[in-house]
Image: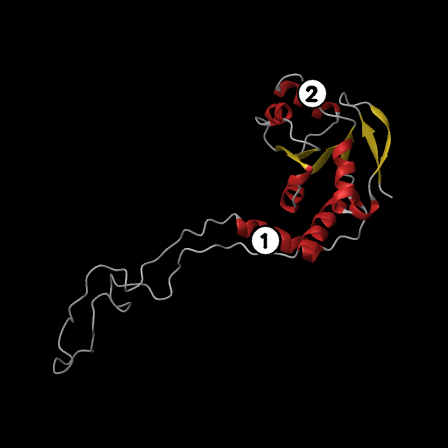
Amino acid sequence: MPTVTLYKQDGSQTGDFQLNETVFGIEPNEHIVTEAVKLQRSATRQGTHAAKTRSNVRGGGKKPWRQKGTGQARHGSIRSPLWVGGGVTFGPQPRKYGYNMPKKVRRIALKSALSLKAQSDSVLVLEGLSFEAPKTKEFVSLLDALNVNEKVLVVLAEKDDVVARSASNLKGVKVITVKELNVLDLLTHDKLILTKDAAEEAGEVLA
């Protein structure tokens, strides 16, 4: 069973914490993780691109010249894709790039990403995390006490606006809840900090 050090908010150690083995200790499936990242990135694409087809281009209602007798190729409209200023053949049209992945596969991807973090000793667990008022300075002190100077993902059991606002001005720091856990955030941040309650909830929900 994966075991990590349990820290207080001031950075002092209070003992060990055992992570759920079925969530943080599985053999990562890299293919599924890759597919989950592709799914998330595809879902964020706007898909607002558009090109006019020959039916959208203005003009060209009259046949440019008669069918026969001119010695030129036959044409029906100056807005044909063959003409400069004409429509585009098979051009991009507005569409959604998102697609679905089975719920069980998404869960395996998330557990694989969490296990990768645990295997690389990138998981820190705090007894609790709270501030009396939103202060960036206090959040910086917390990171310094934990000796964290990389991009960090902080996971709380429940939404806390004070903590979120304390970290909002810090580059490379993101605060989310267990319900918002996703593969892309886990892979794009070097360290993962969970509160004890969040680690327990993640172990129960994803197991």
146 relative position to 96: left or right: right
**184 lies above or below 34:** above
* Nearer-the-camera pick, 96 or 185: 96
Task: State the quadrant of the N terminus.
Answer: top right
Q: In what element is the residue under mark 2?
A: helix
Residue of label 2: 141
Residue found 25% across the figure and 60% down from its top: 57
Q: Amino acid at mark 1?
A: Leu
Q: Quadrant of residue 128?
A: top right
Q: Amino acid at mark 2?
A: Ser
Specify the farthest residue to the top.
132
**53 lies above or below 110:** below
Q: Closer to the N terminus: mark 1 or mark 2?
A: 1
Residue found 52% across the figure and 47% down from its top: 44
Residue found 23% across the figure and 65% down from its top: 79
Residue of label 1: 39
Q: Residues within 10 Å of mark 1 (few under 14, many from 20)?
A: some
Q: Point out residue 171 in the picture as x, y percentages from the top left corner.
A: 59, 30
96 relative position to 62: left or right: right
Q: Residues within 10 Å of mark 2 (few under 14, many from 20)?
A: some
Q: Which mark is residue 90?
A: none
For the question of whether residue 151 can be seen, the reply is no
12 relative position to 68: left or right: right
* Nearer-the-camera pick, 187 or 181: 181
Q: Point out residue 23 in the picture as x, y percentages from the top left corner.
A: 78, 46
Q: Point out residue 16 in the picture as x, y percentages from the top left corner.
A: 87, 32
